[in-house]
């Protein structure tokens, strides 16, 4: 059962913690007793996240994940400063809506850097000696877009398909060390990223997407609870899976 | 050299003419987006009558305005523009547009 002690004494690093799903994950994890290390680029916004957390001992660590080369070393310093980690949630991510004639390699590279390469480097960082402590669990934020298609969103879809694929391989590679690896694939959630997506859709197009979710649009905490489940011992026999949390979007 | 203005603190302001591109460049970008010969799209065109207009080119138009003009216009604002001239006005290229038309 997930109760207020489900993640007691666990230190969990959350990327993308300054907004949306990452911030919601930090809040839910803190309610379950975890000590949260909130990571993002903007210290001010991370501090705002920290102010919403239950309990004490939470930390704010500003870091720009686009510096992918530095991630493993940086994680070592995080563990040296604050103790070994029992979990990592990679919620930082970029979205890109471009028809092919407008799609530029630099934008694709930037997107893959955060959504895919940073995810791999976080796993590489966690597995280092002294950085993790069992039971440890990694949760990546995937998307239903990793499984279904949407015209004009091919780069984003590719990145999320890659997240699902790497989740399986990393789960095999890290199982001997006692690190589980899973992903959560949300449908459309009311969040900052969704607001950004709305900037590329007419009201009519957005209503159509909304109608494709039988249970309506999700809330950030709907995803955060799935993340918490995959971090806690409630999921101790689950690894390499992508948990769909989409209000029924992909069952059509 | 086109100047891209991505920083919200230095957002495009038509009053001070802090623009990322001029009207002829914008029209050339539209030709490219709709895959038409250079010089095909003019300010007089009704946007939704441009050959190749679709939900995808519409998405591309939003991206074009964002990337090249440093502006985030809502899709409904863009759809409220009937002609290319209306759109040029919306992205703050009116005066330059008038000049390019006069020329």
Image (tube, rainbow, N blue to C red):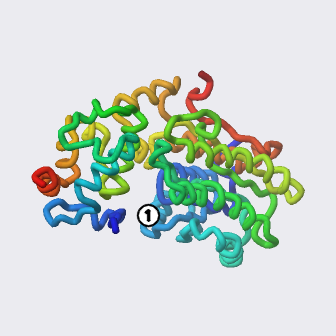
Residue A93 position by quadrant: bottom right
Label tally? 1
Q: Secondary structure at mark 1?
A: helix
Residue in view at x 44 percent, y 43 percent: A194
Q: Is residue A74 above or below residue A49?
A: below
Front-lying residue, A6 or A241: A241
Residue in view at x 72 percent, y 49 percent: A232
Query: From the viewer's perspective, is B89 left or right of A95?
Result: left
Which residue in the structure is indicated by mark 1?
A45
- The residue sitting at the right extreme is A176
Residue in view at x 80 percent, y 46 percent: A236
Q: Is residue A98 above or below residue B23?
A: above
Q: On the rendered image, what quadrant is the N terminus of chain A found in?
A: top right
Residue A26: % across, % down: 56, 55
Q: Is residue A82 above or below residue A220?
A: below
Residue B96: % across, % down: 16, 57
Residue A28: % across, % down: 57, 50
């Amino acid at each position: 059962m997930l109760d207020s002690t489900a993640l007691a004494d666990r230190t969990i690093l959350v990327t993308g913690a300054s907004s949306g799903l990452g911030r919601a994950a930090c809040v839910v994890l803190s309610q379950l007793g975890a000590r949260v290390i909130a990571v993002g680029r903007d210290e001010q916004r991370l501090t705002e996240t920290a102010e919403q957390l239950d309990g004490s001992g939470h930390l704010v660590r500003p870091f720009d994940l686009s510096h992918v080369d530095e991630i493993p070393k940086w994680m070592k310093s995080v563990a040296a400063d604050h103790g070994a980690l029992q979990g990592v949630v990679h919620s930082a991510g970029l979205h890109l809506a471009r028809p092919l004639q407008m799609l530029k390699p630099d934008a694709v590279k930037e997107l893959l850097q955060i959504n895919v390469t940073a995810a791999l480097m976080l796993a590489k960082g966690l597995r280092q000696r002294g950085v993790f402590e069992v039971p440890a669990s990694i949760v990546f934020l995937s998307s239903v877009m990793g499984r279904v298609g949407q015209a004009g969103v091919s780069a984003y879809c590719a990145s999320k398909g890659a997240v699902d694929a790497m989740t399986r391989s990393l789960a095999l590679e890290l199982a001997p060390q006692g690190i589980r690896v899973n992903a959560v694939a949300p449908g459309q959630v009311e969040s900052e990223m969704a607001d950004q997506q709305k900037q590329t859709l007419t009201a009519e197009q957005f209503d159509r997407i909304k109608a494709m979710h039988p249970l309506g649009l999700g809330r950030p905490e709907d995803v955060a609870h799935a993340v918490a489940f995959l971090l806690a011992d409630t999921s101790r026999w689950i690894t390499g899976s992508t948990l769909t949390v989409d209000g029924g979007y992909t069952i059509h | 050299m086109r100047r891209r203005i991505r920083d919200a603190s230095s957002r495009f302001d038509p009053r001070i003419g802090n623009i990322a591109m001029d009207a002829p460049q914008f029209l050339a970008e539209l030709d490219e987006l709709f895959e038409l010969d250079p010089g095909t799209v003019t300010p007089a065109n009704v946007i939704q009558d441009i050959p190749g207009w679709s939900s995808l080119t519409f998405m591309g138009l939003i991206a074009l305005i964002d990337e090249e003009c440093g502006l985030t216009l809502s899709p409904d604002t863009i759809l409220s523009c009937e002609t290319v001239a209306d759109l040029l006005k919306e992205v703050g290229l009116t005066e330059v547009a008038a000049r390019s038309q006069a020329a």
